[in-house]
């Protein structure tokens, strides 16, 4: 076999404590970075990243077990876009789920092939470098703390506020006092139908523009019930893991949040976004708390999305990678270098 892979667990503190409704972790982001080599290309290394989320059944330990299986399934890599698509399908045929492990290898494959062909990843996919601006995400905390963070992030064109606690309305009111732009809220499955319905009028008054995953992932009945009663788009996240989930969400929600670490990487995300658009969904491209490797890979497909939430690396206190630049209008500038255009910072 010509391909070899090495993985590294990277633990990076957050700039500010970062907590969501279904997780109490708020101090450190834990992700897995891989380096992929091909003995036909001795001077090149493909970088990849997958964010293991226990909610989806993945940990750094499961990724370490699954990655060699996926590499064996890929076999001899054809250095072309068709070869990348074939590798993605081979991984899906080898094992179901395990989106973060597939994501890490898929990103590394795209970076390696892009470097081998002298082509940026978005060009490999035939996609535009013109991408929407990213929002900025604020985790759960006391209302006055969230408002202060909102004030510091006021230059972003939209804010995404994590909700699902006892002070949701007070938090949103406090944010609105210091921030004039659109607000997106994400309950991460924590609301009840009655609570969500009662909140809707106030959400509309406060300028909230979408509601993400208010109810548990499998409660499509509740999601559809709320969407029928809401003028705001309800966006599925935990209910929209892979492309296979899309058909079941038609007529249930207005939008879906696609994440590379859920669906399996660059290629699967591009296919899922395109399919979602064909089905009439509004499209949201999200992220986990990844380094610039994962965010650069996500940005490569961002032209397919209406809304973008690619701020994971901005939440970190010390991103170990460089090369991805945020423009003054909060759009990621896609590199014209081959592959992802990111590299490890000098130690």
Image (cartoon, grey):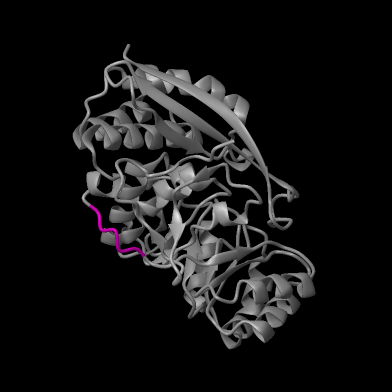
Membership of 160 in magenta stretch: no
Whole-percent x and y of residue 99? 47, 37
Q: Is residue 168 left or right of residue 313?
A: right
Whole-percent x and y of residue 279? 29, 60
**Which image quadrant: the N terminus?**
top left
Q: Is residue 60 left or right of residue 85?
A: right
Name the outermost residue toward the front: 346
The structure residue drawn at horizontal position 58% and vertical position 85%, both measured from the top left corner, is 180
Task: Examine the rendering and report whether any part of residue 252 can be seen.
Answer: no
Q: In this view, does 214 lie to the left or right of 265?
A: right
Name the outermost residue toward the bottom: 205
Q: In this view, does 35 lie to the left or right of 55?
A: left
The structure residue drawn at horizontal position 40% and vertical position 46%, both measured from the top left corner, is 297
**Which image quadrant: the C terminus?**
top right
Q: Which of 248 and 153 is in front in this view?
A: 153
Whole-percent x and y of residue 287? 51, 52
Q: Is the magenta stretch mostly helix, strand or loop?
A: loop
Image-quadrant location for residue 56: top right
Q: Nearer the viewer, residue 212 or 259?
A: 259
Across the whole image, how many numbered discs are drawn on residues? 0
Q: Which of 118 and 347 is in front in this view?
A: 347
The structure residue drawn at horizontal position 23% and vertical position 44%, both measured from the top left corner, is 124
- Give the magenta part as a residue range: 127-131
Looking at the image, is 43 positioned above or below residue 180? Answer: above
Task: Examine the rendering and report whether any part of residue 271 can be seen.
Answer: yes
Whole-percent x and y of residue 274? 28, 55
The structure residue drawn at horizontal position 49% and vertical position 22%, both measured from the top left corner, is 6
Q: Nearer the viewer, residue 275 or 132?
A: 132
């Amino acid at each position: 076999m010509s391909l070899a892979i090495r993985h590294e667990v990277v633990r990076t503190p957050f700039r500010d404590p970062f907590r969501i409704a279904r997780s109490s972790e708020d101090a450190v982001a834990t992700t897995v970075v891989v380096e992929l080599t091909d003995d036909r290309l001795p001077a090149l290394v493909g970088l990849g990243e997958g964010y293991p989320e226990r909610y989806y059944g993945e940990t750094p330990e499961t990724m370490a077990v699954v990655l060699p299986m996926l590499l064996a399934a890929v076999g001899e890599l054809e250095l072309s876009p068709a070869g990348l698509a074939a590798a993605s399908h081979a991984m899906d045929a080898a094992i179901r789920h395990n989106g973060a492990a597939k994501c890490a290898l898929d990103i590394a494959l795209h970076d390696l092939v892009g470097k081998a062909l002298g082509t940026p990843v978005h060009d490999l996919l035939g996609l535009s470098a013109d991408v929407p601006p990213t929002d900025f995400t604020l985790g759960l905390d006391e209302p006055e703390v969230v408002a202060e963070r909102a004030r510091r992030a006021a230059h972003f064109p939209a804010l995404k506020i994590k909700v699902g606690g006892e002070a949701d309305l007070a938090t949103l009111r406090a944010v609105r006092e210091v921030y004039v732009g659109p607000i997106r809220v994400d309950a991460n499955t924590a609301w009840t139908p009655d609570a969500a319905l009662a909140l809707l009028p106030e959400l509309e008054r406060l300028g909230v523009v979408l509601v993400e995953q208010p109810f548990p992932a499998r409660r499509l009945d509740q999601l559809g019930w709320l969407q029928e009663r809401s003028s705001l788009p309800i966006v599925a996240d935990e209910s929209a893991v892979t492309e296979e989930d899309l058909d079941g969400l038609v007529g249930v929600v207005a939008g879906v949040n696609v994440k590379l670490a859920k669906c399996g990487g660059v290629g699967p995300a591009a296919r899922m976004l395109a399919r979602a658009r064909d089905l009439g969904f509004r499209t949201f491209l999200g992220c986990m708390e990844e380094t610039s490797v994962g965010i650069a890979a996500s940005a490569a497909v961002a032209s397919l999305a209406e809304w973008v939430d690619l701020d994971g690396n901005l939440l970190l206190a010390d991103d170990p990678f460089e090369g991805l630049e945020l423009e003054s209008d909060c759009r990621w500038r896609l590199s014209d270098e081959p592959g992802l255009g990111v590299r490890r910072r000098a130690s």
